[in-house]
Every structure is written in structure tokens, then in C-alpha cells.
């Protein structure tokens, strides 16, 4: 009898125990998607003045409203943390029952998720080029580990990483690219993601994958994210705002970025600039926004007044591919975006931009713009073979870090009658090839190396600025290797079988 009672109690305990930590969640959901009172999704970004300001952002569940960060100058001491300074965080509530979502995606994609809190702290008054240690807290006593991150230098050599679209196969495939990039550039001062970080900007699971794929990297190397068209959504009734979608409600809570008050409110934390060092000024544009002319006016005014040796733009859509496609279909899109393209090139020339880092095309391409490059498309293959050193006005790179491949070869452009400007030369390209790029700036020389997922360098070139301001391009040895087209790479399957 006693044994029967014990068995019954055991059965009752089994039935009543919380076998599922999140009974309202889909069974297939990974445990790291769901928030708790412990901090997660920790990310550091440069502030408006990256030499003295860093911003920290992290997530908890909605039970935590009073979070803090602690920070100190890092040292080699065992207890470097003694004397660390606390700083209270502000929080922003995200209620998944209230957020916007794309009407064409089968309804809200975050069913079962309750509200969460994103916390942020701005660390200011920091010393330039200094290694800081920090940690963040959720509930009382629920601390993260200590991370180390470095403020930007005022001068000297600077290197950074640049990734194109993660978008498909974020955790399964893009993680390899993110992590290999760290091995190639362990001293990178920041990481720039050129838009379409995820495929469905309203889907928390994909953002969870993005943070999981980067792991501790984005908590240690400051991140500059660029909004892409997949971070934009149609409104729930299928409509749009100003002919475009709206930015996902998840963007601003997840990232703490500079606010450019002179621009429309919808562009705040998607359009900004950062003077990284004496030699490098970075400008971030939102090419999916309808407020394009406003951005160009701001770019010309801001960049023209900069005395940086090198001016770099991070944006999602490539300006040399006809289209500058936005998220919402428009029967007049071709002419409208051709005008946007022409207006952008004119603005970039006036602003004396040197390098554009983009995504969107799901392939690797590098092109240059200059008065003496000749017709771009017919001569592109010969130009790769010859690799002349010559004057250029602007270089544009497109890359992808996720597991999808477009077909951006010269033949593709010709077949689809997508005309290059006569002043544009396509230098190097690859399909079925995710890459990451290491950019290094040292005085009047800017070097770019584009790496394959295995670490090898696939493309490399240098830009050199002379005393009179002339910029010349020199293709380096990796630029002369075999072109990676579908017929020279391994097999490729469509994204449908990912996960």
C-alpha cells in the first residue's frame, strides 16, 4: 500500500512539475530565445563621439525594471573590478502583442512571447583608445560576465570588420563568417553590418539567432548596424507609410545609436555619422527610407565639412545596381530609383566619399567609379586580368555573410539589360560565396581584404591618397585569382532547406 501511495505521489509530482519552462511557447523554439531575469543579447556600440562614448544594450524579461551596468578601466590585476563605477540603465518595453508586423507573413510571428525589457546605458567621459571592462545586471544579483571593449583612438591605424546580409541561415551559417572574421581581425575597432541582419525584421526568433551567432563578439567589439529593407515591414493592414514600409519596432530597443536631430524622426538611429579617428569618418544611411533627399542633403553638408582622410558610407542598397530597391513594390520603381541612384552618386561625389559598404545583392561585387575607367560592363573581365593602377573617385563593395546566393556577374547584368554607368568598372565578383571584409586604414592608405569563410583572402586592393587629394586604386594579388561563379564552386541549394 505504501509503495502504491509513493508511486501516486511521484506521478502527481511529475504531472504538476514544470516540464516545459515556457508552456505557451512553440515546442521547437530554442531555450535561448526566451528572456529571463538574467541579462542576454548584450551589445556595445560606439557613441556619437567614439573616443569618449560607448553605449550598452541588453535584454531581460519584463520583471526587471531597475537594471544597472558597472564599468572600469581594464587592468591585468585579478580584481580589476574593485572600484568599478555603477550606472543606472533606462529601459524600453517591447510588448509582442502590440508590435508591428508584416501583413503578408501569416499573422504575428511572435505568438506566445510576453513583454520584454531592453535596457541601455551610455558610458560617457571615457578616455580615447582605452580598454574598459564592463558588466550588466538584470534582477538583483543577476550579473553578466565581465566584457572588455576599447574606445576609438584619436589617431593612428584603425581596422574594422564589415559583413553583408546575414538574413538566411543566420545561426547555422552566418555564425561561421562572424567568428572567422574575429580570427582574422582580433583587434578590429568596430563591426559594420550592412543591413538585412535578419530576413523578417519583426520575428524575435531571427533576432535571437543573430545575437546567438555573434556570441560574445558583439559585446566586445562595438557594432554599427545598418537598417536594410528586411528590417522594414508593411503595416498590418497591408498599407505603407509614404510609399514604404515602417521600420520594425524591435530596431530601436535592441540598438542604442546616435540620434541625428536635424533629420525626420523616422530616421533617428538609422542615419548618423561617427568620427572614428583623425583619418576615418563613417556615415550610415537608410536606403529603405522614403526620406532620401533629406539624407543626401545631410550627407553633403556633414561630409563636406569633415577633414577626415577617408570617408566611408555604410548603407544597404548598392548605388551602382540600377534599382536601389526598397521593400514595397512600385510600378514606377525603375524610374524613381534610377533618379535616386543618380542623385546619390552626385551627392557622394560632392561629399568626397571614398568607399561604400553595402549588401542586398546576395553576392560579392566590387566596383569603382572614376572619369578614366572607361565603359564598365564590356571591359570588366579584362580589367580584372590587367589590374591597372589608376585614379578613382569611389569604390563600392557588396557582400553577403548568410547562406543565400545571387547572380551578380557581368553576364547577369547584360542579360537583364541593367546598364552600368560608363564611369563604373566592375573589378571583382563572386557567387555562391559568403565573405567578410577587413578594412585597415593607416594614414593616407586604405586597404581592404575580402575573406572567404575558410579564412583565405579572395579579393584585396589598396587606395592611396596623395597630397593633392588624388586617390589611386591598386589591385593586390588575391584580386587576380579564379573567379568564383556557380560553375567554379561547389553545389548550391536554395535557402528553402536551411535550418
Image (cartoon, rainbow, N blue to C red):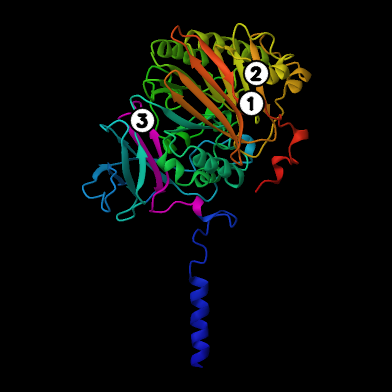
**Contact (Cβ within 8 Å) of mark 2 with mark 1:** yes
Q: Name the residue under label 2.
A: 387
Residue at x 30% of width, y 54% of height: 140
Reply yes or no: does residue 200 show up in magenta: no
> Relative to residue 77, is residue 152 drawn left or right?
right
> Relative to residue 261, is residue 208 drawn left or right?
right
Q: Quadrant of residue 272?
A: top left
Label 3 SS:
loop
On residue 71, which mark appears?
none
Q: Mark 1 points at which residue?
A: 479
Task: State the image coordinates of residue 25 (x, y, percent, origin top left).
Answer: 54, 55
Task: State the image coordinates of residue 139 (x, y, percent, origin top left).
Answer: 33, 53
Task: Judge whether 151 appears above or below 148 on screen.
Answer: above
Task: Judge whether 151 appears above or below 380 on screen.
Answer: below
Residue at x 64% of width, y 35% of height: 104
Q: Name the residue under label 3.
A: 152
Task: State the image coordinates of residue 317 (x, y, percent, origin top left).
Answer: 59, 23
Label 1 SS:
helix
- Magenta stretch: give its range: 32-60
Amino acid at each position: 500500500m505504501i509503495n502504491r501511495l509513493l508511486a501516486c505521489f511521484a506521478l502527481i509530482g511529475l504531472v504538476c512539475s514544470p516540464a516545459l519552462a515556457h508552456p505557451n511557447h512553440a515546442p521547437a523554439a530554442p531555450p535561448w530565445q526566451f528572456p529571463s531575469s538574467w541579462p542576454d543579447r548584450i551589445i556595445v556600440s560606439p557613441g556619437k563621439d567614439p573616443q569618449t562614448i560607448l553605449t550598452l544594450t541588453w535584454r531581460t524579461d519584463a520583471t526587471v525594471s531597475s537594471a544597472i551596468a558597472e564599468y572600469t578601466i581594464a587592468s591585468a590585476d585579478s580584481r580589476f573590478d574593485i572600484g568599478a563605477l555603477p550606472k543606472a540603465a533606462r529601459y524600453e518595453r517591447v510588448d509582442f502583442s502590440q508590435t508591428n508586423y508584416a501583413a503578408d507573413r501569416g499573422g504575428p510571428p511572435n505568438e506566445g512571447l510576453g513583454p520584454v525589457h531592453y535596457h541601455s546605458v551610455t558610458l560617457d567621459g571615457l578616455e580615447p583608445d582605452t580598454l574598459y571592462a564592463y558588466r550588466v545586471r538584470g534582477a538583483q544579483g543577476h550579473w553578466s560576465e565581465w566584457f572588455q571593449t576599447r574606445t576609438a583612438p584619436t589617431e593612428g591605424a584603425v581596422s574594422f570588420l564589415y559583413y553583408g546580409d546575414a538574413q538566411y541561415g543566420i545561426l547555422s551559417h552566418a555564425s561561421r563568417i562572424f567568428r572567422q572574421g574575429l580570427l582574422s581581425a582580433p583587434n578590429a575597432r568596430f563591426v559594420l553590418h550592412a543591413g538585412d541582419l535578419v530576413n523578417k525584421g519583426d520575428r524575435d526568433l531571427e533576432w535571437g539567432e543573430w545575437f546567438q551567432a555573434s556570441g560574445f563578439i558583439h559585446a566586445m567589439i562595438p557594432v554599427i548596424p545598418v537598417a536594410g529593407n528586411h528590417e522594414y515591414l508593411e503595416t498590418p493592414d497591408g498599407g505603407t507609410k509614404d510609399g514604404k514600409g515602417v521600420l520594425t519596432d524591435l530596431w530601436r530597443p535592441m540598438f542604442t545609436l546616435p540620434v541625428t536631430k536635424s533629420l525626420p524622426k523616422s530616421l533617428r538611429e538609422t542615419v548618423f555619422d561617427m568620427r572614428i579617428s583623425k583619418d576615418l569618418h563613417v556615415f550610415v544611411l537608410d536606403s529603405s527610407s522614403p526620406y532620401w533627399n533629406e539624407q543626401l542633403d545631410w550627407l553633403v553638408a556633414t561630409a563636406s565639412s569633415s577633414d577626415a582622410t577617408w570617408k566611408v558610407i555604410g548603407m544597404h542598397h548598392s548605388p551602382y545596381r540600377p534599382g536601389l530597391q526598397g521593400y514595397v513594390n512600385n510600378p514606377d520603381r525603375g524610374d524613381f530609383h534610377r533618379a535616386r541612384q543618380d542623385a546619390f552618386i552626385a551627392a557622394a561625389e560632392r561629399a568626397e566619399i571614398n568607399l561604400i559598404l553595402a549588401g542586398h545583392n546576395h553576392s560579392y561585387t566590387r566596383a569603382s567609379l572614376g572619369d578614366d575607367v572607361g565603359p564598365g560592363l564590356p571591359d570588366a573581365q579584362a580589367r580584372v586580368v590587367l589590374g591597372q593602377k589608376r585614379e578613382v573617385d569611389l569604390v563600392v563593395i557588396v557582400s553577403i555573410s548568410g547562406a543565400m546566393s545571387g547572380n551578380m556577374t557581368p553576364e547577369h547584368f547584360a542579360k537583364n539589360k541593367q546598364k552600368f554607368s560608363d564611369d563604373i568598372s566592375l573589378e571583382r565578383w563572386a557567387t555562391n560565396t559568403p565573405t567578410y571584409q577587413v578594412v585597415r586604414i593607416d594614414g593616407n592608405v586604405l586597404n581592404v581584404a575580402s575573406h572567404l569563410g575558410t579564412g583565405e583572402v579572395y579579393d584585396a586592393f589598396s587606395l592611396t591618397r596623395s597630397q593633392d587629394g588624388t586617390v589611386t586604386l591598386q589591385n593586390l594579388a588575391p584580386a587576380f585569382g579564379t573567379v568564383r561563379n556557380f560553375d567554379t564552386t561547389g553545389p548550391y541549394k536554395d535557402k528553402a532547406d536551411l535550418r
